[in-house]
Image (tube, helix red, strand yellow):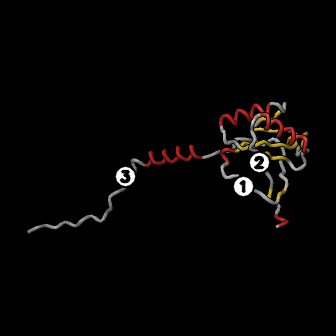
Amino acid sequence: MAHFTKKSKAKPEISTASLPDIIFMLLIFFMVTTVLREQEVQVRTILPMAEALTKIEQKRYVSYVWMGPVKLSGNRFGETRVQIDDALIDDMTNIRDIMYRKLVDQPRLIVSLRVDEESGMGIVTDVQGELRKGGTLRISYSSKRDISNL
């Protein structure tokens, strides 16, 4: 006579031995693909309104130049200055050198000018001249969409 044994209804456990490897790979993936904001804007930039705008799709080719009054302590503002990356520019001729080096590293470079609406046109003209001397001719002007005329 054959004896039949009852099969256990317990399911086999899933092995978690590879779980730390998977978590580590995901962590590395997100660390590599995440883009962090690198610049701290030291000038005020309230962008002017515009009716016709074109969005830049390839943001990785964009280098920002901020122009506006320097932020001081106590919600005060100083004179109008130019900022590239994290540095305030003291000598306007440095702009052409900085941007030329960036253009050599990234030939498809687009310079986006973020100018405070109260800044004078003189500083914008000076920056444009330095950009031209540095060979960075692809320039974009940042603004906000004027929705009142839509």
**Number of the label disc, if any, that sits on residue 15:** 3
Estimate the x, y position of residue 81 in percent, counting from the top left.
Answer: 86, 38
Q: Residue under circle 2?
A: 140
Disc 3 or disc 2, which is closer to the eye? 2
Q: Which mark is residue 78?
A: none
Q: Name the residue: 80% across, 43% down.
A: 66
Disc 2 secondary structure class: strand
- Asked if labels 3 and 1 touch by Cβ distance under 8 angstroms, the answer is no
- Which quarter of the rendering shows the N terminus? bottom left
Res 79 quadrant in image: top right
Residue nearest the observer in this picture, 70 or 3: 70
| Element under disc 3 | loop
Task: From the viewer's side, name the closer residue of 127 and 39.
Answer: 127
Q: Is residue 39 left or right of residue 122?
A: left
Instruction: Decide if residue 142 is on the left or right side of residue 24.
Output: right
Tell which of 26 and 109 is nearer to you. Answer: 109
Q: Quadrant of residue 104?
A: top right
Work out how far the residue at label 1 is from the one at label 3, CA to CA, in angstroms. 49 Å
The type of residue carrying mark 3 is: Ser
Q: Is residue 77 placed above or below 52 in the rendered structure?
A: above
Residue 73 visible at all: no
- Of labels 3 and 2, earlier in sequence is 3
Residues under labels 1 and 2: Cα distance? 10 Å
Is the Cβ of the residue at disc 1 closer than 8 Å to that at disc 2?
no
Q: Is residue 6 left or right of residue 17?
A: left
The percent coordinates of residue 54 (x first, y second) are 74, 56
Amino acid type at image mark 1: Lys
Q: Quadrant of the C terminus?
A: bottom right
Q: Which residue is mark 1?
A: 55
Residue 149 shows up from this direction: yes
Disc on the earlier residue, 1 or 2: 1
- For mark 1, give the secondary structure: loop
